[in-house]
């Protein structure tokens, strides 16, 4: 076990973690996908009427059976979460055996929950005009955290955060706050989102989906690719090889779906994270962008990066062209990426190889995956509808 982190420092250690996505389910698969130009997205039919669409789909099988006491909330989203949890469950149970179960908490992010499973039921009703029974428990946002609490037998706080694209990053921050407020000894945090027709058709109606593979900050960018992911982390107040140093949050409430054009809320979140971590902009060795490949988001994020980092040429890239935009799980899977970058100390995630928008090309985009020098801190951004902004900083050592 690691050393105890001083209560005067906000950092918490990431004791165990797992990430499942279009990148794969192992550290080597994730590294291989992010350090090469291989395409990891899939062109699928059936999600949007009469249209094929590129998505970041998890390609491996999920668990086939779940405990009887979870049948009422059974969904693909829950099975995705349990599949992820299974790889770190023995370690988590061993580690948390030292704590009172009332001080073990779960905070997760999602935007879909189990809605995909009820889509089939609703279709049956509208097409066949027959009475159907809708199991609404499985699609309630809170069901994910409560189900994992029941599964693990923990008795502490358990709740779900749903703030669109910032959900799982917000869950990370909330877990850190619980520990630092001495309300929990360990917190399982992260996020899970699964592909569903509701989400795909919603973004299609907003004309936000790319017609091809998305190109964050690209000259021909035309929207996002949706993805699915599950990322889980056990946090505690013990040091670990990689720690969550700080979380900076803002809510600019500029517009229901558009970001502040000057990136004011985004810049505020990044600066708050730096201040909380006690580091400067020049300490950040890599920035994982929110980088959705929508025209407005990319422009405002680059403006925010200019505001915060100024003359420092921080290496940046967006990984959403490899994972898809995993919405409520985006912050979680990008935390997995940042954690692995810090742990390996040998590579950075490549930015896409397409042409960069001339208005956005004065940045240090990662075009060579080889890490040139050791780095101690990385930053990850998540910016959501309604101006819900959060920036996380991860590090290898305490300041």
Image: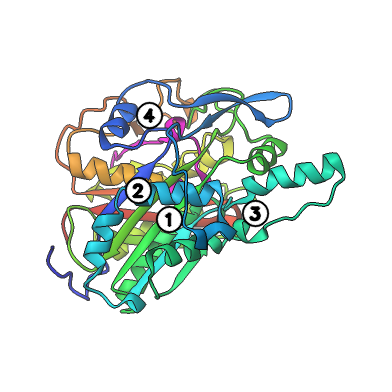
For label 4, count other residues whose C-alpha is less than 10 Å away and answer few (under 14), some (14-19) or many (20+): many
Q: Which comes sooner in the sequence, label 2 or label 3?
A: 3
Seen in the picture, residue 86 relative to 183 is either above or below; the reply is above
Q: Secondary structure at mark 2?
A: helix
Q: Where is residue 94 drawn, in percent x and y?
A: 22, 63
Q: Is residue 123 left or right of residue 310?
A: right
Q: Where is mark 2, residue-wise?
A: 335
The image quarter containing residue 371 is: top left
Q: Where is mark 3, residue-wise?
A: 255
Using the numbered discs, state the Cα–Cα distance from disc 4 to disc 1 in whole angstroms. Answer: 21 Å
Q: Is residue 230 visible?
A: yes
Q: Is residue 56 left or right of residue 259?
A: left
Farthest right residue? 129
Relative depth, front residue between 68 and 161: 68
The N terminus, quarter of image: bottom left
Q: Which mark is residue 169?
A: 1
Using the numbered discs, state the Cα–Cα distance from disc 2 to disc 3 in whole angstroms. Answer: 27 Å
For label 3, count other residues whose C-alpha is less than 10 Å away and answer few (under 14), some (14-19) or many (20+): few
Between marks 3 and 1 in the image, the one whose residue lies nearer the viewer: 1
> Do the residues bearing badges 1 and 2 touch, measured as CB atoms within 8 Å?
yes
Q: Which comes sooner in the sequence, label 1 or label 2?
A: 1
Using the numbered discs, state the Cα–Cα distance from disc 1 to disc 2 in whole angstroms. Answer: 8 Å
The residue lying at 62 percent from left, 32 percent from top is: 209
- Residues in magenta, as a range: 310-331
Seen in the picture, residue 79 relative to 61 is either above or below; the reply is below
The residue lying at 65 percent from left, 54 percent from top is: 255
Between marks 4 and 1 in the image, the one whose residue lies nearer the viewer: 1
Q: Where is residue 27 drawn, in percent x and y?
A: 27, 37
């Amino acid at each position: 076990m690691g050393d105890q982190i001083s209560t005067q420092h906000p950092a918490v250690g990431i004791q165990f973690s797992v990430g499942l996505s279009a990148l794969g389910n192992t550290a080597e698969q994730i590294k291989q996908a992010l350090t090469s130009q291989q395409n990891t997205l899939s062109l699928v039919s059936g999600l949007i009427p009469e249209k094929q669409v590129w998505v970041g789909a998890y390609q491996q099988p999920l668990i086939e059976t779940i405990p009887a006491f979870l049948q009422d909330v059974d969904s693909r989203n829950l099975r995705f979460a349990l599949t992820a949890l299974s790889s770190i469950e023995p370690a988590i149970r061993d580690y948390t055996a030292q704590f009172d179960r009332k001080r073990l908490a779960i905070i997760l992010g999602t935007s879909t929950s189990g809605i995909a499973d009820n889509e089939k039921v609703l279709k049956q009703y509208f097409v066949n005009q027959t009475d159907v029974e809708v199991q609404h428990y499985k699609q309630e946002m809170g069901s994910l955290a409560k189900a994992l609490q029941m599964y693990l037998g923990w008795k502490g706080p358990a709740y779900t955060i749903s703030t669109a694209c910032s959900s799982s990053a917000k869950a990370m921050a909330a877990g850190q706050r619980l520990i630092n407020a001495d309300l929990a000894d360990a917190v399982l945090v992260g996020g899970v989102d699964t592909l569903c027709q509701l989400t795909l058709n919603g973004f299609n109606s907003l004309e936000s989906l790319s017609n091809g593979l998305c190109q964050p900050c690209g000259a021909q960018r035309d929207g996002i690719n949706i993805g699915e992911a599950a990322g889980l982390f056990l946090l505690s107040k013990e040091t670990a090889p990689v720690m969550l140093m700080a979380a900076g949050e803002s809510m600019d409430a500029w517009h229901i779906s558009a970001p502040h054009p000057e990136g004011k809320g985004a810049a505020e979140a990044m600066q708050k994270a730096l201040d909380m971590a006690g580091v400067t902009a020049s300490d950040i060795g890599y920035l994982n962008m929110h980088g959705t490949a929508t025209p407005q988001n990319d422009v405002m994020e680059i403006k925010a990066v200019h505001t915060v980092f100024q003359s420092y040429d921080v290496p940046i890239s967006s990984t959403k062209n490899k994972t898809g935009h995993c919405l409520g799980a985006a912050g979680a899977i990008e935390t997995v990426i940042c954690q692995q970058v810090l742990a390996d100390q040998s590579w950075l995630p490549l930015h896409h190889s397409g042409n960069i928008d001339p208005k956005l090309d004065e940045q240090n985009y990662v075009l060579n995956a080889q890490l040139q020098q050791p780095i101690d801190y990385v930053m990850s951004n998540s910016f959501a509808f309604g101006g819900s902004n959060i920036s996380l900083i991860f590090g290898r050592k305490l300041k």
